[in-house]
Amino acid sequence: MMSRVLLLSFYAYLSFAFDLVLADEKRLETEAHSVPGTNVVLILIDDLGWSDLGCYGSDYYKTPNIDALAKDGVKFTDGYAACNVCSPTRAAILSGKYPARLLLTQWLPSGRWNARKNRMREARYVSNLALEEITIAETMREAGYRTAFMGKWHLGTETYYYPEHQGFDVNVAGRDYGAPGSYFYPFEGRWKIPTTGQVLQKQSPLDGKDGDYLVDRLAEEAEKFIVSSKESPFFLMLSHYAVHSPLQGKPEKVTDYEKTPAGQRQGKPDYAAMVESVDDSVGRVMRTLRRLNLEQNTLVIFTSDNGGFAKATSNSPLRANKGSNFEGGIRVPVLMQWPGHIKPGSVCEEPMISNDFYPTILQATGIKPRPFQHMDGMSLMPLLTESGDFERDAIYWHYPHYNQHPQSFPSGVIRDGDWKLIENFETGELQLFNLAMDIGESKNLVQQHPELTATLLTKLKRWRKSVGADPMQKNQLYESKTLSPN
């Protein structure tokens, strides 16, 4: 009997040892693609819709330079922003955490809540990305990288919470506001704050001269930084204010799009001109990398912070738009290029989210991971290099707020495989969609799949508890206004 036990123990040990060898081989296979000193350029566009690029099916917008990233790299069909509005997604990219865990679930500095009109009180949210978070920029700078941020910041005020306080050596045009006063020099303008009615005078985010266009100026600064950093590894985050309103395109480009009959336009001519200018800026960055022989050693990531603005573009075949938790508000373009590591022309249908960029960048550059920081992200390296396993349970959203975008309501979301469940925080209504069969979210399948609905709702609630998501509360002011008199 004893010999049989020993024999079984021996076989168990061999099986365990074999599993360790296989796991180590997979790790080494993935690490073989990591290249210490690899440069990283992360290009983040504001309000660019999933359907707004040629490589995603648009025959209206002119985006040859961005499309080239898909041709020479990988296109994610099911890439997601961490939120349907801008600031939370940006925080997720920089921190590797879900906005709910950061308690930064709304655009800054405030949203559209109305004490008399809204049934629920919004959940609490902080007004800056906490300095306690070790951002991707801080981690890379500690590893010897030069770091630069250019463009829209929108994650805190100047005194303590600007890019230079969050790990960036260089800050060009990063301010507290989410949109410039104007896209034409001197880039100034006035904005009426929705919650107070007060008027904010937006100062110029950077210098320039008469005739300068903000998208071009940021591209120019990006080129300068790359040239100045050619002898050392660098991390550049080019975060365009475009294509956010005000919708202001270059006149000659606007005129060109106005020639398209109105019924054949995917979006407004001004918006289309802005998309083309963003594409021009991507072309300038890529040409600079090639001219300096840096392209082969640079991971380029391109994405958007949320879906397209309803008044600017059509997100069809997706439902809804920026501000909504339907696909049109959260599914975004995601492209990556890394010559010699990512197979040209690849298409990946695996769902991914903004939190994933942080651990992906660290693994690609050979920098030691920080799992207690980017705890809600997964490295995409197995998908990029087609080596190793990538097994994710689900991805989640928590938006306990109001805004004035169409088809928007306070809600929580889980996507698990092809299934997506939306929970309306006001009414408790549930909507279940199979995205593989119904990308336009036209058929609510809750009645057909009650057990699946219950399972997904349980997972969603369990996730909210695990990340400390702040809940909405009843709005007593709203209730007092609707009670019948005695």
Image (cartoon, rainbow, N blue to C red):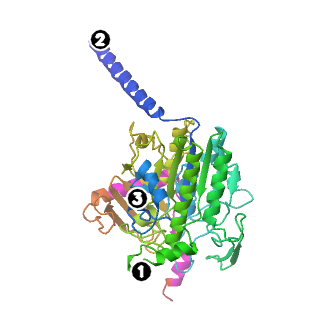
**Residue at 48%, 44% in the rendered image:** 338
Q: How much space separates mark 3 and mark 1, taking CA atoms?
A: 23 Å
**Residue at horizontal 64 percent and vertical 58 percent from the top:** 220
Q: Mark 2 points at which residue?
A: 2
383 relative to 141 in the view: left or right:
left
Nearest to N terminus: mark 2 or mark 1: 2
Q: Which one is nearer the viewer's eye here, 313 or 447?
A: 313
Residue ID at (68%, 75%): 189
Q: Earlier in the sequence, mark 3 or mark 1?
A: 3
Q: Is mark 1 on a helix, strand or loop?
A: helix
The answer to whether residue 243 of the structure is visible from this angle is: yes
User: Where's residue 11, x and y in %?
Assistant: 31, 18
State which mark lies toward you, 2 or 3: 3
* Amino acid type at mark 2: Met
Magenta region includes residue 234: no
The answer to whether residue 74 is visible is no
When the figure is inspected, residue 303 is found, relative to residue 72, above or below; the finding is below
Instruction: Check disc 3 and report its element: helix, strand or loop.
Output: helix
Measure how far apart labels 2 and 3 are at the Cα level. 66 Å
Place of residue 311 in the rendered image (x, y in percent of width and height, measured from the top left): 48, 76
**Structural crowding at the residue carrying mark 2, measured as other residues with C-alpha within 10 Å and reported as few (<14), some (14–19) or many (≥20):** few
* Vertical placement of residue 265 versus 418, above or below: below
Which secondary structure dominates the residues rendered in magenta? Answer: helix
Q: Name the residue under label 3.
A: 55
**Magenta-tinted stretch:** 454-481
Amino acid type for the residue under numbered disc 1: Ala
Outermost residue toward the bottom?
486
Q: Specify the amino acid type for callout 3.
A: Cys
Mark seen at residue 262: 1
How many numbered marks are there?
A: 3
